[in-house]
């Protein structure tokens, strides 16, 4: 009896520990880098549609991809459908990932949580945006390891790129480590 009780107690503690770790991990993935603020006045209907990835920090889930695009559309449940697509030259084929995103606070703030893997969500913070025509945006994750410059066209005016790089640099992003994405396929 005493052994069963001890095993049960240890088992409960392990589950409590795993639960707390999951809460901390998942909560941390929905943050924003120090000093950065998501844009306000965000309009999802204007943001929806196809975006070209101009530059990004290196990370495993996009490594080796060119011609990367992201397409956003409204889901039936009020969330956002996310379809990322890129060309993997080594394998000679296109790679796609479909996800879903939801606003963290209100829909007029460019701060969402996005998931490509079941219940696990990560930050999607729009911290700079062409609010007039929605032609470019600067998106960051929970820390300075994740950053994307997006444009409605495969190329973006170098002056705008420089402004976005300066903004990202002011938050501690290592902009000299960015990958500038080639767009030579459709």
Image (cartoon, helix red, strand yellow):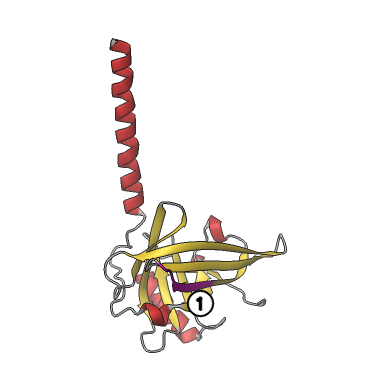
Tell me the chief SS of the magenta region. strand
Q: Is residue 15 left or right of residue 63?
A: left
Q: Residues within 10 Å of mark 1 (few under 14, many from 20)?
A: many
Q: Residue lying furthest front in this view?
A: 76
Is residue 172 among what the camera can see? no
Q: Quadrant of the N terminus?
A: top left
Q: Residue lying furthest top in this view?
A: 1
- Residue at 69% from the left image edge and 64% from the top image edge: 93
- Indicate the quadrant where residue 169 lies: bottom left
**Residue 83 or residue 140, whichever sits in front:** 83
Image coords of residue 30 (percent x, y): 34, 58
Q: Is residue 35 left or right of residue 44?
A: left
**Residue 51 or residue 166, whichever sits in front:** 51
Image: magenta residue range = 70-76
Q: Quadrant of the C terminus?
A: bottom right
**Residue 85 or residue 55, whichever sits in front:** 85
Image coords of residue 136 (percent x, y): 44, 81
Total marks shown come to: 1
Secondary element under disc 1, as helix, strand or loop, is strand
- Residue at 46% from the left image edge and 86% from the top image edge: 159
- Residue at 41% from the left image edge and 74% from the top image edge: 138
Q: Is residue 164 left or right of residue 106?
A: right
- For residue 124, above or below residue 2: below
Q: Is residue 58 magenta?
A: no
Is residue 22 among what the camera can see? yes
- Indicate the quadrant where residue 21 lies: top left
Image coords of residue 14 (percent x, y): 33, 30
Residue indicated by mark 1: 51
């Amino acid at each position: 009896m005493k052994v069963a009780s001890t095993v049960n107690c240890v088992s409960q503690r392990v589950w409590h520990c795993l639960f707390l770790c999951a809460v901390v991990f998942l909560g941390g993935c929905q943050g924003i880098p120090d000093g950065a603020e998501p844009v306000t006045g965000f309009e999802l209907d204007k943001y929806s549609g196809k975006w070209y990835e101009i530059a990004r920090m290196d990370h495993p889930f996009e490594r080796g991809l060119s011609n990367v695009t992201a397409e956003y559309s409204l889901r039936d449940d009020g969330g956002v459908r996310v379809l990322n697509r890129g060309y993997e030259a080594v394998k000679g084929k296109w790679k796609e990932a479909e996800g879903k995103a939801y606003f963290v606070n209100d829909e007029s703030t460019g701060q969402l949580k996005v998931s490509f893997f079941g219940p696990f969500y990560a930050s999607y913070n729009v911290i700079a945006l062409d609010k007039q025509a929605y032609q470019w945006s600067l998106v960051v994750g929970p820390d300075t390891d994740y950053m994307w410059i997006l444009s409605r066209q495969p190329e973006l005016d170098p002056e705008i790129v420089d402004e976005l790089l300066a903004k990202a640099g002011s938050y501690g992003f290592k902009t000299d480590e960015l990958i500038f994405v080639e767009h030579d396929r459709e």
